[in-house]
Image (cartoon, rainbow, N blue to C red):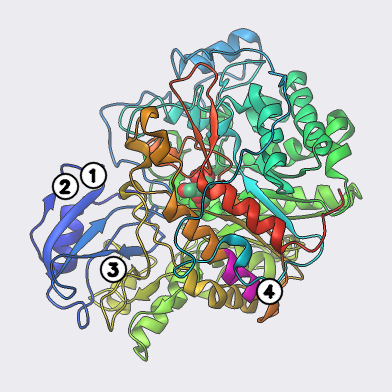
Amino acid sequence: MYLLLSHSTLLALLYGVEFVLSQTAPSTIINVSSLLPDPRTSVVSSHLTSGVAESTTVPATTSGSLFTTSATLTAVPTTTTVPSSSSSAPFPPVGSIPRDYSPAGLSRLWDLIGPVEVPPITTTVIPQTPVTLPSPPPALYPAFFAVTPKDILPDLKFPKGFLFGVASAAYQVEGAVKDEGKGPSIWDWAGHQPGVVTDNSTADVVDLHYYLYKEDVARIAALGVNSHSFSISWARIFPFGASDSPVNQQGINHYADVIATHLQFNVTPVVTLFHWDVPLALNAYYGGFASPNIVDDFIQFVYLVLSSHGCCIIHCLALKHHSRYTFNEPQVFCANVGVFPFNLSLPNGVNSSNAQFHCSYYLLKAHAGAVKVFREMNISGEIAFKSSDYVGMPWRANNTEDVDAVERHAAFGIGVFADPVYTTGDWPQILKDTLSPDYLPRFTEEDSKEILGTADFFAIDAYRTYWNAAPPEGIDACVSNSSDPLWPSCNLEVMFDFNTGWASGPASDPLTSWLQATPQFLRSSFKEYHRRWPAPRIYYSEFGFAQPFEGVRTPAELFQITEDTDRTNYYMTYLGELLLSIQEDGMPVEGAFAWAIMDNAEWNSGLSARFGIQYVNYSSPTLQRTYKRSAFALSDFFQTHLQKEVAI
Ligand code: BGC
């Protein structure tokens, strides 16, 4: 994400080199030629990451011979990038919009966005014919080169009851943005601001999963996978977000039927209560997650969803074996709060620089309060939040600064939320040593007691694993200089091996330059998660891959789109390693979810970076879905490595 500093400033500061802006990549990419004369011996380059607290990634490309390297410095966060500035994004001063909960008040909120696209379908579609899986594609490679999914580690099986599913999120798939009483969310608004989404697409219609969910669930079931992890849109339930505002019964009825449909198809629903789509009203009223007011509003939203008012939802949520998440990837979400365009709605006393940590503080309180409510309601099943990313490995073995860089990466990444919840009830010490209380509000004893232990399992969205290195000027120099572009996390993420210069794995789409496929590190990553944040169960809550250049292909190239070999290889190698992690390392992993059920609105990359195991033809009036090769591979892998169907 972008930075509060320009790239030129950053690079000049870091390496004193000249650089040119790439014409082809999004505005966040900078190419630096010959920055690394020999990758075996130099630490270099950076890729700026989310907000102020994430680390900086160093992808490297080889040109010509392996050791003639040019580094691509990419300002890409963990998964989401936002331009640092834009022409204009009108947003009224926080608190200036009255809390008018009437239809006129709702229209006024929608006026902040302007006209939205009307979907081609406006009622729930009931499929007329059952969905069946077409014949699988022929083998990808000759058997001497690659085995078919069923022949990968055929003697190893997932444990009984394993949830093997696909994942989605409301904003990214639902569309029908203004239908059936829904209020606007901050991402509905952001997607309409100039310069925020690379290809200027919006999620107004996108997959129209809101009306097509029956077919979508049938298509999941046809694959033979047994679970779907999806999120509920807060603004569909509370259009104005606030706990004292009206509830939208249509929203409740909708999710009740979504859940009932999953049960009908024997697909276990796993619900995320918040996947980054804050009701826009809450940003307008008080600054969203940068304000303490969010805590009660979130808790009340969760209470409503779990209570008798959302009676049909509770029917599902109370199921045995069922798990649910409060928050998706809070570290990525909070890293965005102080960044354009979300920094236009910060409350007094919070600025772009400290917003991330204020958000982290309130979000943890909201999470703890929601879990308390859940537990007091005596609902069976389990609850946690979804962490994201990796711990890291020292880039230069035995280099103490790089060892420290890993600790900083872990502390400023997963540790921000996982330490307080799983191990200490407090921020990682590294954060407290680096950030003053006006940056990072301190927990009271009471806060700590309430937060510690508020997760029944550990969930991790683990797409990749890289190395970490100390900044070129050294960690101490960086930590003591809050103007350092790497401050406060003061570490670099490196995507190529120090000794050999080879990449950690194959690259994904240029728009997702944060992502290389790194199956070889999956087992050590899971061991590290479990060692640092022990929990009785682990869910591998998201993993997936953006097939390079899929987003530029036209519907006429469907035969090339469906042949998503890189994504297929990603899934097969990760799943094989996951089996080994469970069976040989004893990791208590009880579920795995492929991101994503289908192509969708990939935040700032819009429709241009594709993660779906199903293609969506956005030019067709029915938004037709087509299974890609990876979907068949997942289906085959699941059927042949599961011990027994999970009982719902
Ligand atoms: C997020 C998804 C996102 C995916 C790919 C995950 O971190 O939860 O919303 O689309 O990564 O970037």
Report the residue marked by disc 3: 481
User: At numbered mark 2, what does the secondary structure look like: helix, strand or loop?
Assistant: loop
Report the residue marked by disc 2: 22
Q: Nearer the viewer's eye, disc 4 or disc 1?
A: 4
User: At numbered mark 1, what does the secondary structure look like: helix, strand or loop?
Assistant: loop
Specify which label sits upstream in the sequence, 3 or 1.
1
Kind of residue indicated by mark 2: Ser
Q: Circle 4: is it few (<14), some (14-19), or many (20+) Cα within 10 Å?
A: some
Which residue sits furthest right? Answer: 378
Q: Is mark 1 within 8 Å of ligand 1?
A: no
Question: What is the x, y in percent for residue 244?
Answer: 73, 26
State if disc 2 and disc 3 touch (CB < 8 Å): no
- Which span of residues is magenta-colored? 575-580
Report the residue marked by disc 4: 582
190 over 111 or under it: above or below: below
State if disc 3 and disc 4 touch (CB < 8 Å): no
Residue 373: say if magenta.
no
Spatial CA distance of label 4 from label 1 is 39 Å
State if disc 1 and disc 4 touch (CB < 8 Å): no
Report the residue marked by disc 1: 25
Spatial CA distance of label 4 from label 3 is 43 Å
* Residue drawn at (20%, 77%) of the image: 39
Kind of residue indicated by mark 4: Ile
Q: Is mark 2 within 8 Å of ligand 1?
A: no
State if disc 2 and disc 1 touch (CB < 8 Å): yes
Specify which label sits upstream in the sequence, 4 or 1.
1
Kind of residue indicated by mark 3: Asn
Q: Circle 2: is it few (<14), some (14-19), or many (20+) Cα within 10 Å?
A: some
357 over 345 or under it: above or below: below
Spatial CA distance of label 1 from label 2 is 6 Å
